[in-house]
Structure formats: structure tokens, C-alpha cells
Image (tube, helix red, strand yellow):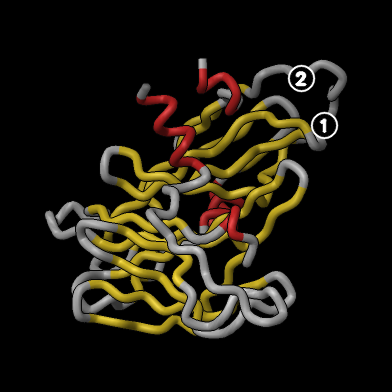
Amino acid sequence: MRLLCLLLAASLLPTHAAQVPVPTPTGGIPAGATVAQHEGPAVTVQTTAPARAGWLNGLRVTAGGTTRTFPAWRTISNPTFWPGVTVTDLSGDGHPEVLVTLMTDEGTGVAVYDARVLGRPDLREWPVTPPVPYLRQQVRLSTHSLTLPGRSVKLPPLPGLRGEAARIGDQVRWTVQEGRLTALVEVQRAWAFTGRLVLTYRAQGERLIPDRVRFDPTPLDDLLE
């Protein structure tokens, strides 16, 4: 059950009771539509402008008596991929933060999510170190192994892909493990799944920075077994 919960969280924490927006005359998503909602404590995520060219640009978050607008936030407008929102303590200080996940790219077998963390009660955004550039700087990859800070890990064999060096892909998912924000970033050889880098964050003041990284070779499908 723990692994199943982790898998469900990997695409991240689902939208809670988001209401269906009233379509505009052209069938789009209007400004002011609720696209994510959390109950207890109440948090609402709304659009600030109508959907355009498949995107929602700019979102407004309301929690308690505070409302803050984030013009730079961008997420896919397809309701299947609307933002996820949860409230959980990511800093370890006993005061929960708001975690919003935005889907910033998708395709066949590809899902790229962005994590946005807001402090409470003021809803000021906490910077989160982007995982992919960080991992590409910290992890060395070769055909048969990858080197993490302080140790080397042998990669599982992949028939038919001899000589293919591993690489860190662009696919990013987010979860919360043991109260810590965690990024799951795929490792590939050619286009074959090799495993994932699991990057755990810690709070440093009002920001989240990488704390440790490990390699997990488990295919996503196996997590259901």
C-alpha cells in the first residue's frame, strides 16, 4: 500500500475537489475558474486569464484570508493535467506549507511537472532549486554506471543497448516522502528507462535546496505489484 501511494503521488498529489469551470462562449476556460482546491485547511487555485493555446498563464492562490497572484506560473489547460495542491510540513518546523504542482510539458510517455511551495499564512513563494540542472551538474553518467556524490552505482543491463551512455532525461515528477519534498527524475539509455534519480530537499530558511540523491532502478509498473 505504501508503494501504491508513492506511485500515485509521483504524478503528484491530485487536485482536491476542483470545480468544473463554466466554459466561455468559445468553449475555453475563463478567468476566475477554480482549477484546484484543498479542503482542511482551505486552499483554492484559480485562473487569472482565459486559457490560451492550451495553456493557463498566471494563477491566483487563496488560503485563509490571504490571496496572492503568481503571473509567472504556467500549466497545461487540459483538465486531466490541472494543478495538484496539498498542505504539508516541508520544512520540519511544524508549520505546513502549500505545495502546488504544475504540469509544464507532456507527450507520449513524458510528463514534466513543476513544484511551487508557498509559506503560510502570507503565501510568499519559497524558491525550489530546479532538479534537472542540479543533477546534471552533480551526477556523472557512463554506459554501465553513474557516480553520485560520494559513491558509484552500477546500472542494470539493458539488452540491445550496448554502448549507449546513460543520460538524465527531462521527465520530472514530485512527491513527498517522510515529510520531505522529493523530485523523481528519469535516467535513460537511448529512449529506454534505466531508473530514476530520487532527489530529496531540505529547508534552508524560506527556500528548499537539494539534500541528498539516490538511484532507484525500479520500473514504475513494478511499484504496483
Residue, x 82% and y 36% (percent of image)?
190
Asked if marks 2 and 1 touch (Cβ < 8 Å), the reply is: yes
Disc 2 marks which residue? Answer: 158
Location of mark 1 (residue): 164
* Residue at image location 70% in from the left, 54% down from the top: 106
Position above or below: 34 against 96: below
Q: Is residue 202 left or right of residue 69?
A: left
- Residue type pointed to by label 2: Leu
Give the percent coordinates (x, y) of residue 178.
27, 38
Q: Look at the image and tell me whether residue 203 can be seen.
A: yes
Q: Image height check: is 161 above or below 166?
A: above
Question: Could you classify mark 2 by the number of other residues whose Cα lies within 10 Å: few (under 14), some (14-19), or many (20 or more)?
Answer: few
Give percent across and percent down for residue 97: 26, 62
- Three-letter amino acid code at disc 1? Glu
Q: Nearer the viewer, residue 193 or 31?
A: 31
Q: Answer with mark 2 or mark 1, whichever residue precedes in sequence.
A: 2
Residue 177 rendering spot, x and y as whole percentages: 34, 39
